[in-house]
Amino acid sequence: MKKTIIVTGGAGFIGSNFIFHMLKKYTDYRIICLDCLTYAGNLSTLMPVMDNTNFRFVKESITDRDAVYKLFEEENPDIIVNFAAESHVDRSIHNPEVFLDTNIKGTAVLMDACRKYGIQRCHQVSTDEVYGDLPLDRPDLFFTEDTPIHTSSPYSSSKASADLLVLAYHRTYNLPVTISRCSNNYGPYHFPEKLIPLMIANALNDRPLPVYGEGLNVRDWLYVEDHCKAIDLIIHQGRIGEVYNIGGHNEMRNIDIVKIICKELGKPESLITYVTDRKGHDMRYAIDPTKIHNELGWLPETKFADGIKKTIQWYLDNKEWWETIISGEYQNYYKKMYGNR
Ligand code: NAD
Ligand code: TYD
C-alpha cells in the first residue's frame, strides 16, 4: 500500500543510503527528506533522486517546531524515520551543546508532531553506543536489547536520552514507536571525519593515518545497505514499543582496519601514526542481533571483505564528492582535532 515517509537527516551518510534503498524498492512510496544541511549534510549526495517525482527535499531543522508542524500538515506522513543527529563522538567531546539540542530536543519535537497530527510509525535510529562498552578480555559478552544503558560520551548520552524519551512517549501517550540500535556502519557517502573514510582519504593523499591510542579498540562493522534493509523491515513489521539491535558479528580492531585499507590501496603502513587517545574511548562494541533475526528474519548480506572493497572503490570513483568536503571548513576541523595530538 502507498505510504508517505518523512526521513530526517537524509542528506547524511545512512539517511541518504536509506532514501536510495526505499525509492528503488517502493516505487509508489512518497519520501520526504527533512534535513537542515549541517556540515555533515550534503545536497549533492541526493542529486540522483532530486528529479524523482516521489521525492521531496525540505531544508529545515528538526528543532524548529513550526517548520516541522507545517511539514506534517502539508504531507500527512504515515511513517517518520529519524536519522537527523549530530553523530561524531570527537565533536561531542569538544562541543556537547548542539548534540543536546539536535539529538534530544529535536527528537522530542518530531514526536510532538506525531502526537499532534497522528502517525502509523515513529522510528528512532539509535546506536549501540547507548550501551557503553565491553571489556576486550570478555569476548563472550554482547549487547542485547536488555543490556543497561551506560553511556560514555556526550554523543552517546544524547542518543540514550532520546531513546528514553521515545520509550516514554510510547508509554505515556501510546505513540507507535520503534527504536533500532545499530553498530558502526561503513559504505558510500560516509563523511570523511569517521575512521574508515578518513583513513581512505588520507591514504589516497599520502597523509599520516592517525590511529588513536594503540588502535586496539574494537568496533562491530556493518555495511550501510544492511542497516537500511533492517530499518525497512522494522518500520513495516517490527513490533510497536520495541527496541531492535542491528549488527552482523563483524568485530574488528581499528589497527587491523587501517592496515586493510593500506593494503587495498597499495600504501605503506609507515603512514600509520599513533596519536593521543580519545577521551573516555570505548574499548569494544559487539551486538547480539538474535532478536531481529528471530522476529524479522534479518541477516547481514555483505561480508566485510567484500564491503570494504566496494567502499574503497566508491571513494576512488567519487573523488569529487569527498575532495570537495575536505577542501573547505573541514581543514579547520582537522587542524583543531589532530593538530596537537
Ligand atoms: P551523519 O552525520 O552522516 O548525517 C546526519 C544528517 O543529519 C546530516 O545530513 C545533517 O545535516 C542532518 N542533521 C543534523 N542536525 C539536524 C537538524 N537539527 N535538523 C535536520 N537535520 C539535521 O550521520 P549518520 O552517520 O548518517 O547517522 C545517522 C543516524 O544514525 C544518527 O542518528 C546516528 O546516531 C545513527 N547511527 C549512526 C551509525 C554510524 O556508524 N554512522 C551507527 C549507528 C547509528
Ligand atoms: P568513529 O568512526 O569516530 O566511530 P565511533 O567512535 O562512533 O565508533 O571511530 C571508530 C574507531 O576509530 C574509534 O575507536 C575511534 C577510532 N579512530 C581513530 O583511531 N582515528 C581517527 O582518526 C578516528 C576518526 C577514529
Image: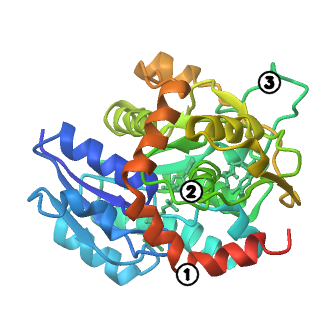
Q: CA distance from mark 3 to mark 2?
A: 34 Å
The percent coordinates of residue 76 (x first, y second) are 20, 63
Q: CA distance from mark 3 to mark 1?
A: 40 Å
The quadrant where residue 276 appears: bottom right
Please name the residue shown 43% across and 71% down the image.
Answer: 324
The quadrant where residue 339 appears: bottom right
Identify the mark at residue 329; answer none if there is no mark.
1
Identify the mark at residue 141; answer none if there is no mark.
3
Mark 2 element type: helix
Kindly tell me whether mark 1's CB lies below 8 Å from ligand 1: no
- Which of label 1 and label 2 is nearer to you? 2
Nearest to the observer: residue 122 or residue 35: 35
Question: Of the residues under marks 3 and 1, which one precedes in the sequence?
Answer: 3
Please name the residue shown 79% across and 24% down the image.
Answer: 141
Using a 10 Å C-alpha cutoff, classify the residue at mark 1 as few (fewer than 14 neighbours), some (14 to 19) or many (20 or more): few
Q: Is residue 323 left or right of residue 2?
A: right
Residue under label 2? 201
Residue 108 vertical position relative to residue 79 in the rendered view, above or below: below
